[in-house]
Amino acid sequence: MAVSLEDAAQAMREALRETVRRHWLWHLIQGGCMGVAGLLALAYPLLSSVAMVAILGWILIISGLVQAISLIGARHVPHFWIQLISVVLSVLIGWLFLLQPREGLATMSLLLVVYLMVEGISKVVFSLTIRPIPNWQWVLGSGILGLVLAAFLLGNLPVSAGWVLGVLLGLHLLAEGSAIGYLAWNSRVSGASTEPSQ
């Protein structure tokens, strides 16, 4: 019985790895969007700027939609629902940034804590599931960074300086975007190199 459970778990992990390889371009686009958002947040950390909040909102929405496209046809892969929750949160927080760009820092801080926690857990689970795809550790590291930033932010509520939110969000988006983009690019390369032998 234990062997069959292990076989089933291995089959599920392989299905997720194959999904990453098949949708590498969407993951690459998602990583690029998140990286750009991270650079913008670091360059303009004062989230009180309405224009900056609007730009971040749009980038979070686009990143979430791209991640949603990569989940099409992947409903039966492991931890699908965690990835789906991550998509919904990304789009929802982006939408809230667009709807209420002048909201107080306390609301922004709480939204950011939830976002960082869910994204961190999502990426940790995702990375452990796709291993041993090359460079899965980068995704794991970005997930752990998200959890550390969420804990730091939660321990320092209420945040009085807008630049703190911008820097934390920027660090997280840049780390996660780089990790996902790097993983996607290497999945493309490994998929291309293994294709002729199949």
Image (cartoon, rainbow, N blue to C red):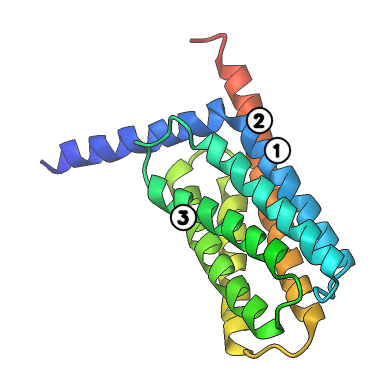
How many labels, in total?
3
Disc 3 residue type?
Ile
Residue 83, position in %: x, y?
A: 47, 49
Depth order, front residue of 192/117: 117
- Residue 34 appears in view: yes
- Measure the alpha-carbon separation of dots 2 and 1: 6 Å
The N terminus: image quadrant: top left
- Front residue of 56 and 185: 56
Q: Which residue is drawn at 58% across and 23% down?
A: 191
Q: In this view, does 46 lie to the left or right of 172?
A: right
* Mark number, residue 85: 3
Dot 2 corresponds to which residue? 25
Q: Mark 1 = which residue?
A: 29
Residue at 59% across, 78% down = 110
Q: Where is residue 115 in the image (x, y as percent from the top left)?
A: 57, 66
Left or right: where 63 falls relative to 5: right
